[in-house]
Image: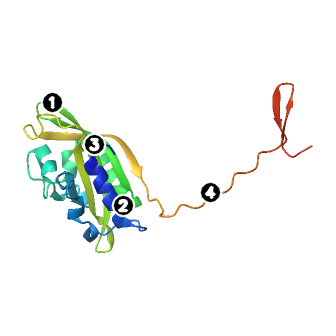
């Protein structure tokens, strides 16, 4: 993750999750992520409505020049990429994993900006596939951000960050090296058969 807001949100999500697959929505503490809140959003997991925003931080709204609450997250993406975005959201929810992706935003007058997208599934009232928290942040903020709203997004490279158990299993001791001998400049490893 390149952007500090993504790092803050991911660390908080991971800490709240503990040894479980997902944290509860109610366990997300806005005070703990206050420096990242402007870049944070929460989505309803609703494939029929393209995952509408439940809330969106001020910097996320400023990227698009409008309030995003209730607006379909999927509709921010280029026409040909909406299915791919929906598949990313579904994968994060189905597998209880984090998704980090690059994105390119384009304004109506053709200016572009590189963004970082983070998607993190949540449990809500004990159920999965209801809420997702995320962050959308510019990698570097050009001078025109806020003055020229973005009209579409395109997905770039992506990575999936799976569940890491609190305790890793102990490593098995390395097998002893087999006996070896030198013969005519070659190393011969004895394989146990004569």
**Number of other residues with Cα within 10 Å of mark 2, as a class: few under 14, some 14 to 19, many 20 or more:** some
Point 18% across, 35% down: residue: 106
Tag nearer the camera, 1 or 2? 2
Q: Is residue 101 left or right of residue 67?
A: right
Circles 1 and 3 in contact, beta carbons < 8 Å: no
Question: On the image, numbered disc 4 is attached to which residue?
Answer: 171
For marks 1 and 3, the one nearer the N-term is 3
Tag nearer the camera, 1 or 3? 1
Q: Is residue 87 left or right of residue 63?
A: right
The x and y percentages for residue 118 are: 30, 50
Given the current orientation, which residue lies at the most extreme top position? 184
Point 28% across, 74% down: residue: 125
Point 62% across, 57% down: residue: 171
Q: Which labelled disc corresponds to residue 29?
A: none
Q: Which labelled disc corresponds to residue 14?
A: 2
Q: Is residue 171 left or right of residue 177?
A: left
């Amino acid at each position: 993750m390149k952007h500090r807001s993504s790092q803050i949100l991911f660390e908080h999500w991971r800490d709240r999750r503990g040894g479980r697959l997902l944290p509860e929505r109610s366990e997300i503490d806005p005070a703990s992520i206050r420096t990242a809140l402007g870049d944070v959003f929460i989505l309803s997991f609703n494939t029929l409505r393209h995952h509408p925003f439940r809330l969106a931080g001020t910097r996320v709204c400023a990227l698009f020049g409008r309030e995003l609450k209730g607006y379909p997250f999927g509709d921010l993406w280029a026409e040909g990429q909406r299915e791919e975005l929906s598949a990313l959201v579904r994968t994060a929810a189905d597998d209880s994993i984090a998704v980090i992706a690059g994105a390119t935003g384009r304004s109506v007058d053709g200016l572009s900006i590189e963004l970082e997208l983070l998607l993190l599934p949540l449990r809500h009232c004990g159920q999965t596939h209801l809420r997702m928290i995320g962050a959308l942040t510019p990698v570097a903020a050009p001078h025109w951000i806020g003055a020229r709203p973005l009209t579409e997004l395109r997905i770039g490279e992506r990575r999936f960050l799976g569940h890491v158990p609190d305790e890793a299993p102990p490593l098995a001791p390395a097998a002893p090296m087999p006996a070896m001998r030198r013969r005519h400049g070659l190393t011969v490893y004895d394989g146990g058969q004569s």
